[in-house]
Amino acid sequence: MVPSKDSETDLIRQERARVLAEMRTVQEDLVDIGSRLEKNRPDFGLGRGGSQIYEWEMNLARRDSLRQKLAHLQEALQRIDTGQYGICIRCGQPISPERLALLPSTKLCAKCARELEKQRHGRRKRH
Ligand SMILES: [Zn+2]
């Protein structure tokens, strides 16, 4: 039998597996989109092919958001490895699994996120 780390719960192990699986999917999408961008490089000089350029730009935007997602997943993985995953950095309370499933890289529990959002909102309103 493999001895497991005391601090590592089943939930954390599941989360790591889930984050790793999601990272693989995102990486595959990135490779796919990278080759599509390479193949369908539009000719910007010809003054035609508006839809081609549109598609190109859509793919560029998608690649950016995938890269961002990958960075978030990597951050989540780091937090899993350092034992900070699923703990709110503001109040130190555990973050609900539902929230983590939705936002794997979140550092705030739902309550703190709401409060911070309210503060931001309040500041915006006063201006
Ligand atoms: Zn909190």
Image (tube, rainbow, N blue to C red):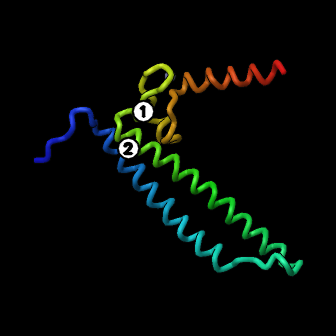
- Residues 113 and 31: in front is 31
Within the image, what quadrant is residue 86 found in? Answer: top left
Label tally: 2
Q: Residue at x 43, y 21 (%)?
A: 92
Q: Which mark is residue 26?
A: none
Q: Which mark is residue 15?
A: 2
Q: Position of residue 32 (x, y in %)?
A: 55, 71
Q: Using the image, determine if residue 54 lies above or below residue 93.
A: below
- Residue occupying the far front of the picture: 45
Q: Residue at x 52, y 53 (%)?
A: 70
Kindly indicate whether the residue at mark 2 contacts the one at mark 1 (C-beta within 8 angstroms): yes
Q: Residue at x 34, y 41 (%)?
A: 81
Mark 2 nearby-residue class (10 Å; few <14, some 14–19, many ≥20): many
Q: Position of residue 58 (x, y in %)?
A: 72, 64
- Residue occupying the far left of the picture: 1
Q: Position of residue 66 (x, y in %)?
A: 58, 56
Q: Residue at x 45, y 29 (%)?
A: 95
Residue at which label 1 appears: 86
67 relative to 47 in the view: left or right: left
Look at label 2 and name its amino acid: Glu
Within the image, what quadrant is residue 126 found in? Answer: top right
Q: Using the image, determine if residue 115 lies above or below residue 47.
A: above
Q: Secondary structure at mark 2?
A: helix
Instruction: Report how far apart the C-alphas of labels 1 and 2 lie in the structure.
Output: 10 Å
Look at label 1 and name its amino acid: Gly
Quarter of the picture holding the C terminus:
top right
34 relative to 24 in the view: left or right: right
Q: Secondary structure at mark 1?
A: loop
Q: Position of residue 123 (x, y in %)?
A: 75, 20
Mark 1 or 2 closer to N-term? Answer: 2
Mark 1 nearby-residue class (10 Å; few <14, some 14–19, many ≥20): many
